[in-house]
Image: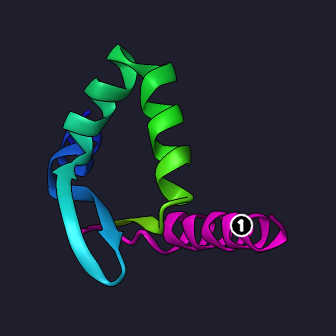
Amino acid sequence: MKKVFDMMRYNYIQMNRKGSEVFKMPLGLFFVLFLLGFKTLCILMVVSLFFDFTYSFTGKDDMTAVNTFMDKVNRIVMQVKEQF
């Protein structure tokens, strides 16, 4: 349980736009917001991807796998934008 608590406390989700950081919040806070407003938060995150926002995870733990997935999502969104 301590490992999960530390992961939520010492790792962050970071929102960037055009190379600059817009905001950064601990994963614990993000998890609480996700539970409270799942549908709204998902919609906002997906829509923001179409406005050149990107998401990444930083912190003390190795977040390579999650960031690789987020990079793939960003590339898919860019491909969709180019088609329209």
Q: Residue at x 18, y 50 (%)?
A: 25
Total numbered circles: 1
Bounds of the magenta segment: 58-84
Magenta stretch holds residue 37: no
Q: Is residue 65 left or right of residue 83?
A: left
Quarter-wise, where is residue 4 in the image? top left
Q: How far across and how far down the image is residue 37, in percent? A: 38, 18
Task: Locate the C terminus by quadrant.
Answer: bottom right
- Residue type marked 1: Lys
Quadrant of the rendered structure where residue 71 is?
Answer: bottom right
- 81 part of magenta stretch: yes
| Residue 13 horizontal/vertical position (percent) | 30, 56
Q: Quadrant of the N terminus?
A: top left
Residue 65, image x, y percentages? 56, 69
- Residue beneath the point at 26% across and 45% down: 27
Q: Main secondary structure of the magenta part?
A: helix
Q: Which residue is mark 1?
A: 81
